[in-house]
Amino acid sequence: MHVAIIMDGNGRWAQKRGFPRIQGHREGLKRVEELIRYAPKKGVRHLTLYAFSTENWRRPRHEREFLFSMFESYLKGKRDELKHNGVQLRIIGLRDNLPENLVDLIKETEDYLSKGSNLTLQIAFNYGGRSEIVKAVKGIINDELKDFEVDERVISRYLFTSGVPDPDLLIRTSGEKRLSNFLLWQSAYTELYFTNVFWPDFTEEEFDKALGEFFQRRRRFGGI
């Protein structure tokens, strides 16, 4: 099973409590760590988390810098734990405009965790669904594929998520009901689950609720 999550509401969670927005990101990271340990117990083999979008560059500079620092610290500080838990890590998104030292750290961490077999964890960082599709098209053009060679399977192979099945379930927290440029191609037949719960309050029990609703649905994939 593949579950994708738009982890929304960190800032609003913090502001509601009179905290700075970055405190919401700190609390949100705790939920990430809990979910990575918990999801495989529920039969999840692939987990994709929306951490930083291409649109998030519009956020205040101090908040962006905090998110980058938190992401870098996570890669450095948690990789041994992830390896112990059998997690294969993939960072999906654009890297052209990321700091060189962060790109190097991403590559090093992905290599270090490449053999994990219990859970494939995809962290979407500097990610946008439209830019992903544009990059895929450019790759196809660069490889000079003929039009008759291009089908849905070929396009999927050129996406950041190549080799990973499309999401079965996409969860968005905080009450917003849109995809926000996340996994646009991959989510064609994904079941969507929206909750008003802010991400820092998205506990294991809330995850179970989402899975429970998913398993009650009948997936038709365009059929009857």
Image (cartoon, rainbow, N blue to C red):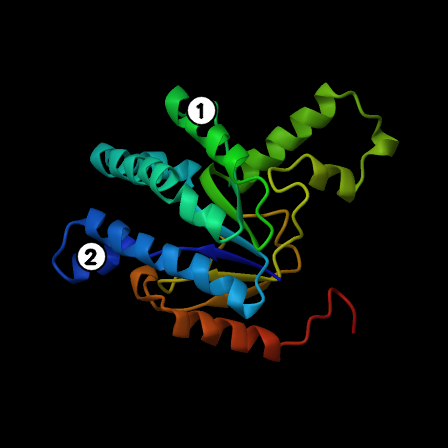
Label 2 crowd bin: few (<14), some (14–19), many (20+), radius 10 Å:
many
Q: Amino acid at mark 1?
A: Asp
Tell me if residue 178 comes above or below residue 197 in the rendering: above
Residue 35 in the figure: left or right of residue 46: left
Viewer-nearest residue: 85 or 141:
85
Q: Residue at x 21, y 47 (%)?
A: 22
Farthest residue to the left: give it.
Answer: 18
Tell me if residue 53 comes above or below residue 149 in the rendering: below
Q: Looking at the figure, which quarter contains the N terminus?
A: bottom right
SS of the residue under disc 2:
helix
The x, y position of residue 57, in whole percent, is 35, 34
Tell me if residue 64 comes above or below residue 18 in the rendering: above
Marks 2 and 1, how far apart in space?
32 Å
Q: Residue at x 35, y 59 (%)?
A: 31
Q: Which residue is mark 1?
A: 104
The x, y position of residue 206, in whole percent, is 40, 72
Q: Amino acid at mark 2?
A: Ala
